[in-house]
Amino acid sequence: MFDPTVLDGVCTICGATDEDFLPAAQRRNRFARLGTYSKIVAGLQWNAAAIDLTADSQAWPGLPEPRRELLTKLVSSFRVAEDAVSEHLTPFTKATDDTLVAWVFFLQRRDEDRHKELFDRIAAEVVGIPGDTPDERRDAARENVPAPLLELFEERLPAMAEGLASGSTGLDEGVGLYHMMLEGVVFAAGQRALINDLTEGSLPGMREGVGRVEVDERWHVGFGLRCLAEARPSQELIEDLMARATEASEVWGDLVPPPTRKYVVDMCHRRLSAAGLLAARKAA
């Protein structure tokens, strides 16, 4: 059974905690060494095919229609988005000369493949998205996905990946979009909305699976933040990330409530500030 307390240890190691960060003088000790990520990943291995969705599939028809509609749209969005991130992470491994960094990107790609498999199973076995193959279900799921989210994952993300592959886009720009925006804001908001809905317990398999995905994504964000801090990006890029954080949080539309969208935007600011990349906001 999934133990949510594992989040605390992972966040402390990765520097992606939801609590207050350490003082500036101690920030250099907040990030894991690159070699530590292999140990993190080894301790977080799980099998998407082993998540038991039997109770979920039995409970699904009895859920209120508005709730089923909300969950269908959230699951469909993750089904499409996880497919995209799994595909477009590949250029990151070739955009760095550091073989250890490239290895950690490879480990992340393996996680994303697992997430794609999980959400495809949920779409097929619980939600009932039509299609005999994963590709058919992905295409069917697209009909339930907000247009701004589709544009972000099916246009902006591929364009960024193409730029990384050609050398016209820097790794700091790629990490800024992929790790800080897509994972740190968009995925974080959607996962938080899903978990809040699933806490009542009628869909235990989904709750376990989404919880495990969230743990994976936290180390991804922590690793991305580490890469960004070491890249010493321009203040212009960092300010642009902050401006885009609000835009990214809004791609879900009314599927994610405003307090959750605000929470992930504020968390993005805190991460960048804690890494020494952005001056802390002055108290109002």
Image (tube, helix red, strand yellow):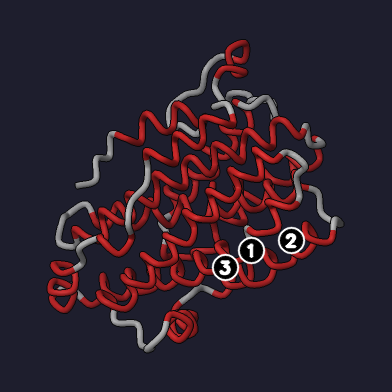
Occupied quadrant, residue 98: top right
Left or right, 204 with reference to 159? left
Q: Which residue is mark 2?
A: 160
Q: CB of mark 2 within 8 Å of CB of mark 1? A: yes
Say which residue appears at 47% left-offset and 79% top-offset.
138
Distance from the alpha carbon under mark 2 to that under mark 1: 9 Å
Q: Nearer the viewer, residue 111 or 9?
A: 111
Residue occupied by mark 3: 84
Tell us which disc is closer to us: 2 or 1.
1
Q: Which residue is mark 1?
A: 88
Amino acid marked by disc 2: Met
User: For the residue carrying disc 1, how many other residues have a C-alpha within 10 Å: few (<14), some (14-19), or many (20+)?
Assistant: many
* Residue 276 position in % (x across, y down): 67, 24
* Distance between the alpha carbons at the discs numbered 3 and 2: 12 Å
Q: Local crowd at mark 2 within 10 Å, few (<14), some, or many (≥20)? A: many
Q: Residue at x 67, y 36 (%)?
A: 227
The answer to whether 232 appears left or right of 225 in the picture is right
98 up-or-down from 134: above or below? above
Residue 19 versus residue 83: which sits nearer the camera? 83
Q: Is residue 283 left or right of residue 167?
A: left
Q: Amino acid at mark 1?
A: His
